[in-house]
Amino acid sequence: MTIDPGGVFGPVHDHVGRPGTVYILQGTITDHRNGVATDYGPGVGWPEDRNTTHWLENRGTVPAVEISVDIVSRG
């Protein structure tokens, strides 16, 4: 997924029933959860579990590119 400068991936969403992981390839993505904004740059990522409620933004000047994988049940 690519988030252009000034772009947002939202609205606020959770990962109940679809845990996942994110890995940043380029740029910086700011992850907003529980009132805390955390910046992640290339080579870094984070897990997303049933307790994750968040939204993302690119506050930088270059496109931010991430690999994001959610695990969903077929049932």
Image (cartoon, helix red, strand yellow):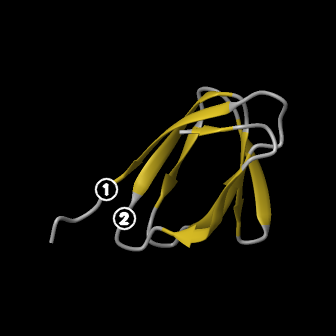
Between 5 and 39, the one lying in front of the other is 5
| Residue at image point 50% right, 44% down | 22
| Residue at left offset 64%, top offset 62% | 10
- Whether tag 1 and tag 2 are in contact, CB under 8 A, the answer is yes
Whichever of callouts 1 and 2 sits on the residue coming sooner in the sequence is: 2
Q: Residues within 10 Å of mark 2 (few under 14, many from 20)?
A: some
Tag 2 residue? 18
Residue 59 is left or right of residue 22, and the answer is right
Amino acid type at image mark 2: Arg
Query: Residue 34 versus residue 67: which sits nearer the camera?
Result: 67
| Residue drawn 72% across the image and 37% down it | 4
* Number of other residues with Cα within 10 Å of mark 1, as a class: few under 14, some 14 to 19, many 20 or more: few
The CA distance from mark 1 to mark 2 is 5 Å
Q: Give the image location of residue 49, x and y in percent.
A: 45, 64
Check disc 1 and report its element: helix, strand or loop: loop
* Horizontal arrangement in the rendering, residue 20 relative to residue 26 (left or right): left
57 and 21: which is toward the camera: 57
x%, y% of residue 21?
Answer: 45, 48
Please state which amino acid type lies under the numbered disc 1.
Answer: Ile
For the point 56% across and 40% down, the residue is 45
The tag on residue 71 is 1
Depicted 8 relative to depicted 29: above or below: below
